[in-house]
Amino acid sequence: MASVRGYFHPKTATGRSSLIPEPPWHYSGDLLTVEYRTDPARVRELLPEPLGLAPEDPGAVALIWADWQSCGASREELLDPVRAQYKEAFAVVRCSYRGRVYSRCVHIWVDKDFAIARGLHQGYPKKLGSIHLTRSHPYGPAPRIEAGARFGATLAAADRRLAQAVVTLREPSETAGFVNGHPMAHHRWLPAIGKGGGLALDELVESGAASFEGGQPWAADAELELFDSPTEELSRLAVHEPIGAYYRQIGVVWDGGTLLESGTSGAE
Amino acid sequence: MASVRGYFHPKTATGRSSLIPEPPWHYSGDLLTVEYRTDPARVRELLPEPLGLAPEDPGAVALIWADWQSCGASREELLDPVRAQYKEAFAVVRCSYRGRVYSRCVHIWVDKDFAIARGLHQGYPKKLGSIHLTRSHPYGPAPRIEAGARFGATLAAADRRLAQAVVTLREPSETAGFVNGHPMAHHRWLPAIGKGGGLALDELVESGAASFEGGQPWAADAELELFDSPTEELSRLAVHEPIGAYYRQIGVVWDGGTLLESGTSGAE
Amino acid sequence: MASVRGYFHPKTATGRSSLIPEPPWHYSGDLLTVEYRTDPARVRELLPEPLGLAPEDPGAVALIWADWQSCGASREELLDPVRAQYKEAFAVVRCSYRGRVYSRCVHIWVDKDFAIARGLHQGYPKKLGSIHLTRSHPYGPAPRIEAGARFGATLAAADRRLAQAVVTLREPSETAGFVNGHPMAHHRWLPAIGKGGGLALDELVESGAASFEGGQPWAADAELELFDSPTEELSRLAVHEPIGAYYRQIGVVWDGGTLLESGTSGAE
Amino acid sequence: MASVRGYFHPKTATGRSSLIPEPPWHYSGDLLTVEYRTDPARVRELLPEPLGLAPEDPGAVALIWADWQSCGASREELLDPVRAQYKEAFAVVRCSYRGRVYSRCVHIWVDKDFAIARGLHQGYPKKLGSIHLTRSHPYGPAPRIEAGARFGATLAAADRRLAQAVVTLREPSETAGFVNGHPMAHHRWLPAIGKGGGLALDELVESGAASFEGGQPWAADAELELFDSPTEELSRLAVHEPIGAYYRQIGVVWDGGTLLESGTSGAE
């Protein structure tokens, strides 16, 4: 009996049309991270049950810009790079669940559809945006990875700029920040098809990198500005106090996560 | 106790960030439809259980280009039209379910993220694409809606052209085609988060317009070309025999659907 | 002896690659116009010699959004509409030259390369931008062309919103504004290739529509906001006093202009 | 007496709106070069008087993909990278002029307006396109710069793919090709504003890098495909015989060129 195949839609007889291949997914990327403290109440209001604030530094936020090349196990996307390259900017907070601290992405913008699809699977609340970040380069005016090097990073959605940062490298660092350093606790939500029908999918999932390699992290100083928009709430995570900023080049593999619980978020 | 709100992600305290508002969704649009027959086996292979081929004319396909302006109940998107306007191209076939004939979208490309989100809810297998169709206009070189008027329509994804058509209006028509004229039978699928875990969501849903208004349909002649792509299978629905083509301006409201059954598709 | 052909670059043996065909160029479009008064000194500073302020109402500005379909004499672009459709937003002031009043476009953003090329020829100072305006539609939530109909219009460049307007139709009008109603007096400038070499091209040209047809203009009320940007100066033409707003659908033909004088602008 | 300023349009009182700053222009970039031989007659037909074929290997073509970050003397664009980053793909041939061999770009596509403006100044016949090339990266699945590393490169314009290549690094090389290694001999053409008025600007200019630095070039093997398009003629430079392929990271400064002669091209 015939069926349809493909890790994601559209499912077909061959599976070849799927917007994304099955995991593992492999990533090469450059990350600019700006960490700061906001009012913990603004973090709290983004955490549905059963999540709570992290016990330490509960108002910490990481705003991260990433310039990625990604692919499935075949790596074929890398040779047709319109299918591999994308950029994203995302805001991460921490939360606690059953006594353990998790990271949680609360806003994220990407610039390709395959990245949206992976986000649906992983519980990243992705929208389309326009994301730019300076890339290091060994020649010409672009910055080397060295003290004093300056990187710009910007984010826009729906033709409005939402955030911009200038990050100046200071010195090698032991870490590239702590806010995005835990396993992710994300919700996967989809409304029921019927009117007023609540949620058809309401899962709390955990995931993280299956493997990770990275270069020397650099500590940096950052100037960060957030801008209001009628359809976005990133600026609600207002900067109360800077924590730090970081630059790092990394390689990551993602290969699935774990269902923590289902049907409990109380989200409306 | 605080929770998070919003019809879609990202869910926040206010619900204002949601990529889409709750239904009803209102649409104004121009549609170019090209209907043709392909090998019914190529339709059959896209129909997972419990769906079967339509009993009459089972190889009929409609390839439809649409130029939309859409909004939620507040209609505020219309005044910030980057949030309201989008274009799409999609392939529709018919199928049978429990003795009734349904329409089913098997491939679709849109050019905005809010349209992708609505598709996830409705079971349309949306990807991003670049879609263009000539618009009628009362002055200058663009076509009036009249006999002999010619409209072009093109579709590309990942920098490859997938389809192009030239549609020439012939005469007023009683219909705008039959392939997309039934309630839609769509699947809503999402893989489980765990590796090799099957589907977390596997729903067969039915939906259709909550209300509809439309102008005079026009019958037309069409030249249609489909092109191969390594990541798309639209051209697998090869044109064996033209049926007809149509132009129509319409207004539609969508306000939810019905769950038909769950967990039965056998999709891999 | 072989030569190269084509109205614009790239010139080739066939001329087929030219970014634009030779005039006449035909246009179908919808226009939203917002007229207001700014400080005449801000207009004056944009007028190089030998141009001066218009004697009447010298601070009048028209900010115009247009949604176009355009083509050359063959009209073939209309059937491959990615080559025909574009949107633009532009600021027009008036000026005087040898005792006659002209219109002059001082800032303009478009979203296609062929529109940039035509602007280079015509002396419009075009940049790329993201432009959106509500389109009238006979069905669904989009506005009809009638009293009370509301249209939104937005402009962004380099991921920053530069202007937005909401225009509400009031009543049929005898005109669609006066600021853009004169022949255009534009400069065509190109720097000399040598360092510090001044201008290789410094022409003052006049042009206007070779033919024009249009529907009923509508008078409207407008709310207009201009936003600052580090690389744009549209907001320097600040709104001091509203004049009026207008909606109109038109057809236009452009078929060349006239050289007024050369080498006299003193532009640096 | 007030005038207007700015290296390019729009010229204003401050000069701040200019689409590009005055040279010098600084560039950091990665280049993938594929060299091959085509029918010399196809090169000859692109060379207007007084240019002729190069005496040696006259059918040699270089198709080059470049991923750039660029800026003016202030380098401020690098901190707002939407204004600095762009990609391009271009075809270069050689020609002879007064007994000397020059390189000449005959087709080029870029993805930003500031790059179009610089091309107008330098005589590059730029259109907008969608250009992608794999970037090397020290971590994850993207290639290191080493033997066996594979890079993909693609070009599309108007929603049609025009070229694609897969380049596999073989070994360090003394050069990164020879076709694009000479000073550039380009025409700067603009039609006269009057109907049938010939050319207002018809300059043959020479330019090249004011300074250059570069990493180790790598020799590579390439698979290259060119595709037809109704509006492009890149595929007319059909591949008759491969020459070689190269990868290199470079830094370049451009600071003006020299007028060779004017009014002599005979271009139509």
Image: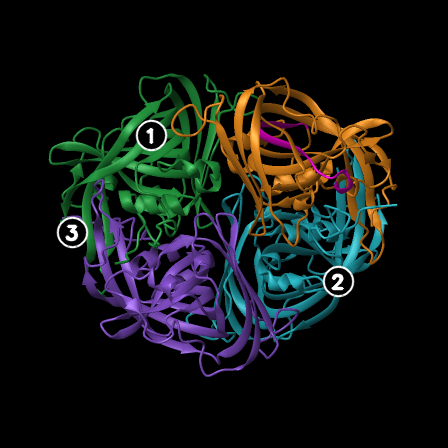
Chain colours: A purple, B green, C orange, D cyan
Q: Is residue D34 visible?
A: no
Q: Chain of mark 3?
A: B
Start-end of magenta stretch:
C24-42
Q: Quadrant of residue D86?
A: bottom right
**Any magenta on residue C145?**
no
The residue tagged 3 is: B266
Q: Is residue B105 above or below residue D156?
A: above
Where residue D125 sits in the image (x, y, percent)?
68, 48
Q: Quadrant of residue B84?
A: top left
> Comparing marks 1 and 3, which lies closer to the viewer?
1
Q: Is residue D20 above or below residue D148?
A: above
For residue D24, the mark is 2
Q: Quadrant of residue B177?
A: top left
Q: Chain of mark 1?
A: B
The amino acid pointed to by label 2 is Pro
Residue at 84% of width from left, 43% of height from top? D263
Residue at 53% of width from left, 44% of height from top? D228
The residue tagged 1 is: B252
